[in-house]
Image: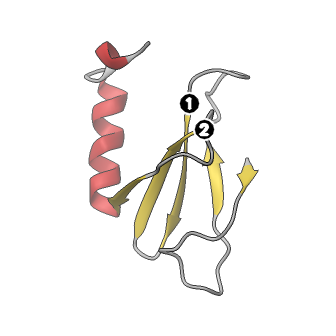
Amino acid sequence: MTTSSPSPMAPSHIKSLWIKSQKSAQGGNCVEMRPGGGSVEVRDSKDPAGPTLQLTGTGFARWLAVARSGALDHLKD
């Protein structure tokens, strides 16, 4: 797990932590997420200073379900 600055979506008194999947390989392709303020941010673990994808809680659950189904596998490197 990697720590980062608080999310702009999180209440100012809560420090959000980036969470990496337990299934991610060491140095492999993976994403990290952090909840805050009713939404979820997702980022590329290899580019922690890069852009983030911001989703509602419902949007994140749907995105995760689609990713788990394999429907996005064609987007892999």
Q: Amino acid at mark 2?
A: Asp
Residue drawn at 55 percent across, 84 percent down: 11
Q: Position of residue 65 (x, y in %)?
A: 31, 38
As displayed, is residue 56 above or below residue 29? below
Q: Position of residue 4 (x, y in %)?
A: 70, 59
Along the viewing direction, whichever of 50 and 31 lies nearer the viewer: 50
CA gap, disc 1 and disc 2: 10 Å
As displayed, is residue 2 above or below residue 37? above
Question: In this figure, which residue is indicated by the disc labeled 1?
Answer: 30
Q: Position of residue 73 (x, y in %)?
A: 34, 17
Q: Secondary structure at mark 2?
A: loop
Res. 30 image quadrant: top right
**If the image is split into quadrants, where does the C terminus sit?**
top left
As displayed, is residue 34 above or below residue 37? above
| Residue 31 falls left or right of residue 58 | right
Q: Residue furthest front?
A: 50
Q: Secondary structure at mark 1?
A: loop
Q: Residues within 10 Å of mark 1 (few under 14, many from 20)?
A: some
Residue drawn at 68 percent across, 66 percent down: 5
